[in-house]
Image (spheres, rainbow, N blue to C red):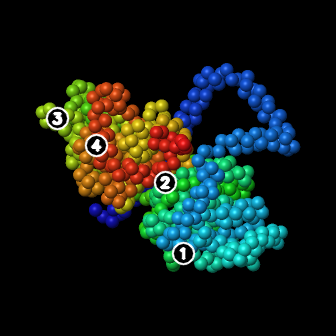
Amino acid sequence: MDTQNKDEIKDYKEAYEKERAKAAFLLERVASLEDQVDDLQFKLDRIHNNGLWKVSKPAREVYHFVRRQADRIRNQGDARGVIKKVQYKIREKQAVKGYGTASFPDKEERARQEKESAAFQNRVLFSILVPLYNTPEEYLRDMLDSVLNQTYDNWQLCLADGSDDAHAYVGKVVAEYRSRSENLAKRIAYKKLDKNGGISYNTNQCLELAKGEYIAPFDHDDYLHPSVLYEYAKVINEQGADYLYCDETTFRESNLNHFVTIHFKPDYAIDNLRANNYICHLSCFDRKLLEGEELYRSEFDGSQDHDMILRLTDKARKIVHVPKLLYYWRSHAGSTAGNIAAKTYAIDAAKGAVADHLRRHGFANFKITSTRAFETIFKITYEIQGDPLVSIVIANRDHAQDLKRCLTSIFEKSTYENYEIIIVENGSTEEETKRYYKEVTSGPYKDRVSVVEYKYAEGEAFNYSRINNFGVSKARGEYILLLNNDTEVISLNWIEELLMYAQRDDVACVGGKLYYPDKTIQHAGIVIGLGAHRTAGHVHYRQRRENLGYMGRLCYAQNMSAVTGACLMVKKRIYDELGGLDETFEVSLNDVDFCLRCRQKNYLNVFTPFAELYHYESLSRGSDVEDPHSENAKRYDREAEHFRTRWKEVIERGDPYYNPNFTLDRSDFSLKVQD
């Protein structure tokens, strides 16, 4: 072949690849828009078909009339003032029992904490860094009082004041506190800055005053729980923690019980942290972690905490989450807690901080985009490495129509092309099923689909784990994708969304977001110990598809203890290394058990909401626990007991990606009922 022909072929191939990429992009856009239209129409129909909507027409008309009148007098503030007072009184009465000021130590508990902490072997000195800038006097005094009120007394408060001349009272208030005693004069270090250099510069100036072994940055308008330093010192002594954080709440109206949000956090989870700064307040860390590092970098002002946390947790040996509400973040006009739009530069800074972190970890050609939950909650799109073969393994017994719907959705919607489908036939008797096998293995996708038959031994019972293991043994792919036959693909790039995580060296299992046909959630990650059997349960179960989830958790990829085997991708190497699904779990909990065994090997498991499918659950084999006297229910009870025995210590410790403040009786992140 001459050079000219080779060049022409090369040009044609390049043009083809470009057009194929464009087509894939357009298909994704069309699917996304169709999805949005579908969701909006569903919402509209639900409203219009609701009897209450029809009978409430007169009330709506009155409401809109009142709103119009209220708008006319809004400038006078009368209507809004009355409404705000009513809202305030209602919320004040609704303070969550067991949290807020109700959790502050009384005189007896304070004495106990003071006595215990005085005897700590390591009486660590905490340096609390607070950059001051035109701080309202009320907020300033609240902040100072919250430090002075700590039950652990070995602390230093480092204040760098960048306030302008119009706010000279800031320095005077600090001087007043320092003058109260010789002890406070030594423990409250104050520096008046020549200029306001921004949050990073000012905080770094605080650090120059610090003498402590542990550093804790603290915002000038926020509030500390009286026990936070005691709890941190205790964890440092007991566990050798070198990075600590706690749960937090935002509050309004200078009332610590006027909660706006309560953020009960998971333990350290790198994928959560990359997607959003869930650690946030109150970060506290061993000063040694700063060796060779800046505290805050001015190029990330607005998201300097996220940048700092990503850098220091990378270096930390022992990251400990104290699952108690110990930080109170004041929400007011101009604060990030109140409105991220007040600090729009923070969005770009956060993306920059995450990008810098990802590059340090060797990632390239990634994309970071804001999600529908919040501007600083991100979707990270990782580059797919190479073009690996993905083996989709589907166990099937009859239910030809379900299987056809599943396969058709894969053929028609998948933008990833290098896959094979292995149907594991296990006991079908219907002619329709056999006809479909012939059809799908002789049609246009014949090169992608194979049917392998699992032959039962005499008297052998159905064993889902064994059947899937058999199917995987026939797979040629570098990646295994276990898929139920009663699923239907929604996301065009569903395979890519799973693969971008499964290809990482630190990740084992990756699961997608599954819906029932009515668009309520069937699977969005699994929590250990959740549910009546105290084995494992699906969080956000039966929530609407459009729901953002607790603190936006339905909108970003995150680490979970387990994901469902109804749609689970994993490297074949890892599957083989662990011996596949444990066949002693015949039908249920084999996927959770597999994920926990992966976790034992120090792999992460990831749930991504960007690989979406419908799951017509239990169509193939019926519900496990629908009838408590059925054989299925009895078998599930046996497997549940087997699971509880094997993973007893894990269940007792609690799921690290949940939070002990949440009840295990519900899947909606409800709080435990306080006694």
Mark 4 surroundings: few (<14), some (14-19) or many (≥20) residues within 10 A: some
**Amino acid type, callout 1:** Glu
Residue at the image point whose x is 21% and y is 27% from the top: 429
- In screen coordinates, is 538 left or right of 80? left
Q: CA distance from mark 3 to mark 2?
A: 43 Å
Q: Secondary structure at mark 2?
A: loop
Residue at label 1?
A: 213
Q: Position of residue 269 (x, y in %)?
A: 46, 58
In the displayed structure, 138 sits above or below 617; it is below
Give the image location of residue 125, x and y in percent.
57, 73
For discs 3 and 2, the disc positioned in front in the rendered view:
2
Q: Earlier in the sequence, mark 1 or mark 2?
A: 1
- Mark 1 neighbour class, 10 Å CA radius: few under 14, some 14 to 19, many 20 or more: some
User: Can you give x and y, in whole percent of width and height, for residue 42 in the image?
Assistant: 55, 31
Image quadrant occupied by the C terminus? top right
Q: CA distance from mark 4 to mark 3?
A: 20 Å
In space, the residues marked 1 and 4 are separated at their CA atoms by: 47 Å
On residue 642, the disc is 4
Q: Which mark is residue 266?
A: 2
At a point 60% along the width and 30% down the height, the residue shown is 44
- In the rendered structure, which amino acid carries the disc numbered 2? Pro
Amino acid on which the number 4 mark rests in the picture: His
Q: Earlier in the sequence, mark 1 or mark 4?
A: 1
Q: Earlier in the sequence, mark 1 or mark 3?
A: 1
Between marks 1 and 2, how big is the CA–CA gap?
A: 26 Å
* Circle nearer the viewer, 2 or 4: 4
Q: Quick one: label 3, few (<14), some, or many (20+) residues within 10 Å?
A: few
In the image, what residue type sits under mark 3?
A: Glu
| Disc 1/disc 3 C-alpha distance (Å) | 64 Å
The crowd level at tag 2 (other Cα within 10 Å; few <14, some 14-19, many 20+) is many
